[in-house]
Amino acid sequence: MEYEPRIGRIPIRDLSPLQPEDLWPAKAFAGEVVPFSASIFKDGHDILGADLALTTPAGTRSLHRLVDLGEGSDRWQTHALLDTEGTWNWHIEAWVDEWATYIHNAELKIPAGVDVPLMLLIGTTLLKRALAADPSNTVLADAAKAMAAKRSPDDVRFAASLTPAVTAELTKNPLRALLTRSASHELRVERARAGRGSWYEFFPRSEGAKQKSNGSWKSGTFRTAAKRLPAVRAMGFDVLYVPPIHPIGRSFRKGPNNTLIAAPGDPGSPWAIGSAEGGHDAIHPDLGTVADFSFFVKAVKREGLELAIDLALQCSPDHPWVTEHPEWFTTLPDKTIAFAENPPKKYQDIYPLNFDNDFEGLSREVLRIVKYWIGLGVKIFRVDNPHTKPLRFWEWLLHEINTEYPDVIFFAEAFTAPAMLQGLGQIGFQQSYTYFTWRNTKEELEEFLVSISDETSAFLRPNLFVNTPDILTAFLQFGGVAGYKVRAAIAATASPSWGMYAGYELFESVARPGSEENLDNEKYEYKPRDFEGAEAAGRSLAPYVTRLNEIRNEHPALGQLRNLAVHWSDDGAILVYSKYLSPEFTPGGDAIIVVANVDPHSVRETFVHLDIRQFGIPAGQLYEVTDLITGQVYTWGLDNFVRLDAFTEPVHILSVTLPKGS
């Protein structure tokens, strides 16, 4: 044959997890349980078997048996715990299971009296082959001897092949024919924080800021901001994210609420980076010095937190690059430099970068800047508007950094079209913001949750932030306390990474008219808050947030991305989903059911319907669930009545008491 077929003897198609076009390795994080699957089929009626062959970065190889998912899909699947950082290799092996095929045929023919001597001979021959590979196996030896005993009745001889012991031996070590291997693929496993964590955002300049008697302000510093860290950690957060900490330009500086005129004491937007004091490798003098920043980094680490800083590749008109490298910007026909726009929004205080004029020079400068901050102890970068820079630049930069510093994490702030949002994840961004803030109805959330946990999980890691300085959705503006609880509960349980921006726990919900931004936005002014006073007065969500993070830490099923299943309810506002981790991967297993009333203005009564087989519970069996918020215990089955009052507790987070061995 001159033409070499691309299909093996047993077709193995549509492998997962793979990236689209398989241009880059699929992604996972250390401690993630990953489903591997493929479509496997063959001509004829032979019974098939398949294994996942998995090789660790250290070269250790293991086999994991795939299970036929049935229902005519030809889809096979298994799960594997990836516990070591580095590049793993995997492929699928499929074969004809000769013993299973024989048993299937013999069970039809022998009771019908068809080809009985031949079938018994085939069975004996197969057992002897298996015994030749394992001569000391007494189970196989006894079965082969019994089947070969021609003086015994045929049904007795055949029964020797059907014992549980024989079945177990030949399931564990099958007789394989027509063994076929798929192509080999890489899978990149990154550190756990790349896929799991609770994030909190605050502006260091607001922490400790004080208003003087003349109405002007004294900025908070890194040292005053450090005093807030114990409270952040006490709420259970893992990562502290701070907006840009660089000098802020004075030209076209924005005033309160994004006004075009700033008073002398207005601090301006931290995203308008650069002034005479320096650019992206400088620290705003009001916040302190490099020594003060190092103090802050150490304080964050002492609290058991990780620090994420902003990488915002844009400049104020006063940035040193504007005069030193004008080619790094877009010059308009009237000789002015183009400022940033996102119509109808205008950012006169910000110049976007243009990579097309000097791709290599600008790229090398950004690489230098990132390495500078890594040298000061930063390992997480929240990247502002990455979708406004070339994808090939990010592919290059992340490759350069992660090759030298594999523990560095890049988090894409890209609220943009799906192709670009997903493309950023595909080329290497470890985490991404998503459309979560705008998915509010039951139907929207069901579609969204299936997408992030299944359809894009090989390359896109969602971080479900409930709010940002730029995003205060109508759901939060008008949803009251219930709205804030619902959004936080879904974010904290649906994804292994979630986050919130300071003020969320105080129910800050008044928007600037005609926008989705907070009134008196902290981007443009100092905003000290009385967190302790609000909590003492019972006007804080902090205790609820703390409990959510406790639940996340107590239940390993919530630390996984790809294990979410949507269930059913009879009410259009009752969202139901679960997360399950089997005893194979955590002692005793772990199952969480979330039932959320996504209408923050009502009391809802309805029935929810669960596929409890997913938890290893037989369909007719009753079981107990415990509400991890209220402590109430219920006895549930397949169909269960719920009443969720938006004005008390709008969400059930239920821990399932699993039967032993489920």
Image: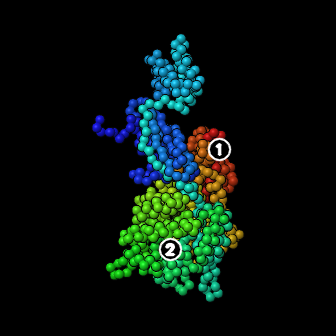
Q: Nearer the viewer, residue 343 or 298?
A: 298
Name the image quarter holding the C terminus: top right
Depicted 542 relative to depicted 595: above or below: below
Q: Nearer the viewer, residue 331 or 569?
A: 331
Depicted 263 relative to depicted 571: above or below: below
Amino acid on which disc 1 is placed:
Gly
Q: Is residue 112 left or right of residue 635?
A: left
- The label on residue 253 is none
Which residue is under mark 1? 588
Amino acid on which disc 2 is placed:
His
Q: Is residue 73 left or right of residue 580?
A: left
Q: Residue at x 44, y 34 (%)?
A: 179
Q: Is residue 337 left or right of residue 408?
A: left
Residue, far left: 2
Counting from the top left corner in percent of width and height, residue 190 is at 53, 55
Q: Residue at x 53, y 18 (%)?
A: 147
Which residue is under mark 2? 280
Residue, far right: 536
